[in-house]
Each structure stands twice: as C-alpha cells, then as structure tokens.
Amino acid sequence: MNRLLRPWLAIIAIIALQGCSWLRTELNDPEITLVGFSRAASDGLLLQRFALRLHITNPNDLRLDIKGMTFTFEVGGRELLHGVSNDIPLIEPYGEAEFTVQGSARLLEALQLLRDTHRNGSNTMDYTLYTRIELAKGWPSTFNLKRTG
C-alpha cells in the first residue's frame, strides 16, 4: 500500500506547489491625486460637506475592485475633512479613473486655520491627503496611501 501511495503523494505535492506559484505576493500601491475641491450640499451651518475629486492610477496587471475607502484631508497640518465612500469605480489593469468623495468638515479646525493664515499672511498652504483603500478581494487587501501638495 505504501508503494502505491508515494507516487500519488508526489503528484499532489507538485500540483500544490504549482498552485502556490499562482498566488500573488505583492501589488504595487495605486497612485492617488487630488484633482478638485468644492463645497457640497449641506444640512445646515454646523454640518458642512465638501467634495474631493480624486484621480487614481492602477500600476498593476489586475483590476482593482475597491470595496471602500476612508480619507482624511489636512491643510496646513490641520485636519479639515474626513469621510468614507463605497462608491468607487472598478479600475482596470494599468488603468485610471476619476471619482468624487464627500466628507464632513471640522469647523473648529477650519476657523483656526483661517486665523493662522490671517496672522501669517501666507498665500499658499500645504495639504496632505491620507487614504485607506480596501479591496473587495485579493492580497494585499488594504492600501494606506498618502499624497501631499
């Protein structure tokens, strides 16, 4: 029995090892860029909403099916917006897409930023966009991206 079993175990081991070679161990991080920033419809003075127009580039040879993303938008080192979205288009291999996400403003931070800007007399400000993108399937399943400008 042992002599009959050995060839089959060897064949199964070869097939299993070949199957492992099909698994992806690494994906390149997508590139995300801020294209636009605008005010969105809001439900009153205390809850202000803004829209970020984002451009994403997929440097991989497989499509990115994005389940959702969270983001934080900072200006001058102050967190102005944060939000989530599950409405992101499928990004084809070596493709790109533009989409809009909406976020809630942190009014106190915005007022402090305006005060600091007025005091410093600066005409330009640096921004940082932090995003966490979760894929519907695949490995790795999450990308943490940072974009500055």
Image (tube, helix red, strand yellow):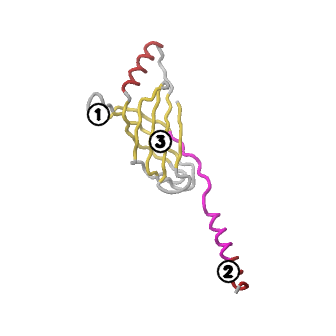
Q: Which residues are magenta?
A: 11-32
Going by the numbered disc 1, the residue's amino acid type is Ser
Of marks 2 and 3, which one's residue comes earlier in the chain?
A: 2
> Disc number at residue 8?
2
State the image coordinates of residue 111 (x, y, percent, origin top left).
38, 21
* Viewer-side label of 3, 1: 1
Q: Point out the residue furthest to the left here.
A: 44
Q: CA distance from mark 2 to mark 3?
A: 51 Å
User: Residue 118's image quarter?
Assistant: top left
Tag 1–tag 2 contact (CB < 8 Å): no
| Location of residue 13 with respect to 113 vertically, above or below | below
Going by the numbered disc 3, the residue's amino acid type is His
Q: Nearer the viewer, residue 48 or 30?
A: 48
Please tell me how crowded label 3 is: few (under 14), some (14-19), or many (20+) other residues with Cα within 10 Å: some
Q: Quadrant of the N terminus?
A: bottom right
Point 62% across, 55% down: residue: 25
SS type, badge 3 = strand
Point 28% across, 27% down: residue: 45
Q: Is residue 13 magenta?
A: yes
State the image coordinates of residue 145 (x, y, percent, origin top left).
53, 40
Q: Nearer the viewer, residue 120 or 79?
A: 79
* Viewer-side label of 2, 3: 2
Tag 1 residue: 42
Q: CA distance from mark 3 to mark 1?
A: 24 Å
Point 47% across, 55% down: residue: 136
Tag 3 residue: 55
Q: Nearer the viewer, residue 72 or 60?
A: 72
State the image coordinates of residue 63 (x, y, percent, origin top left).
51, 55
Q: Is residue 63 magenta?
A: no
SS type, badge 1 = loop
Of marks 1 and 2, which one's residue comes earlier in the chain?
A: 2
